[in-house]
């Protein structure tokens, strides 16, 4: 079995390996709590040392973009990016699913089609 990893890239660009749920919530609070008109984002990535990678970027406007890649270098997209708008609570739920490797549950969410 290959080694799995999870990395959170916060609003400030710093990476946190194997973030806790508290660290995920703090990162989202920073993103959603930015100054008026200031666009910010943070990204949670999950993958395997020798293969697949998934990432969910959350912006200060609540936009979420979920991507699936063949590897950590983002060489081959395995699906079109999925998008939705969510609250901070919903974004945390999605990130927690990703951190728990529940990709199939994420795919089943109500993504926008346009």
Image (spheres, rainbow, N blue to C red):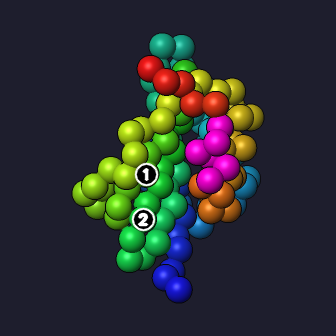
Q: Residue at x 62, y 53 (%)?
A: 104
Horizontal and vertical percent position of residue 68: 43, 51
* Residue at the outermost left position: 75
Residue under numbered circle 2: 52
Residue in the foreground of this view, choosing between 29 and 84: 84
Considering the numbered disc 2 on the image, is that residue within a helix, a strand or a loop?
Answer: loop
State how many labels appear: 2
Circles 1 and 2: CB atoms closer than 8 Å: yes
Marked residue nearer the N-terminal end (1 or 2): 2
Q: Is residue 106 magenta?
A: yes
Residue under numbered circle 1: 68
| Left or right of 79 in this view: 86 | right
Against 84, residue 106 (above or below) is below
Mark 1–mark 2 Cα distance, whole angstroms, equals: 8 Å
Q: Chief secondary structure of the magenta span?
A: helix
Considering the numbered disc 1 on the image, is that residue within a helix, a strand or a loop?
Answer: strand
Dot 2 surroundings within 10 Å: few (below 14), some, or many (20 or more)? some
| The magenta segment | 104-109
* Residue at the outermost bottom position: 1
Residue in the foreground of this view, choosing between 16 and 96: 96
The quadrant where residue 35 appears: top right
Q: Residue at x 53, y 86 (%)?
A: 1
């Amino acid at each position: 079995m290959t080694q799995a990893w999870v990395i959170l890239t916060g609003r400030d660009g710093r990476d946190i390996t194997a973030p806790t749920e508290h660290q995920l919530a703090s990162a989202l609070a920073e993103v959603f709590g930015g100054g008026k008109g200031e666009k910010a984002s943070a990204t949670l990535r999950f993958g395997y040392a020798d293969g697949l990678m998934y990432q969910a970027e959350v912006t200060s406007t609540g936009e979420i973009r979920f991507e699936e890649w063949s590897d950590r270098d983002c060489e081959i997209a395995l699906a079109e990016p999925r998008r939705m708008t969510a609250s901070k609570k919903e974004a945390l739920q999605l990130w927690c699913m990703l951190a728990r490797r529940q990709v199939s549950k994420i795919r089943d969410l109500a993504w926008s089609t346009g």
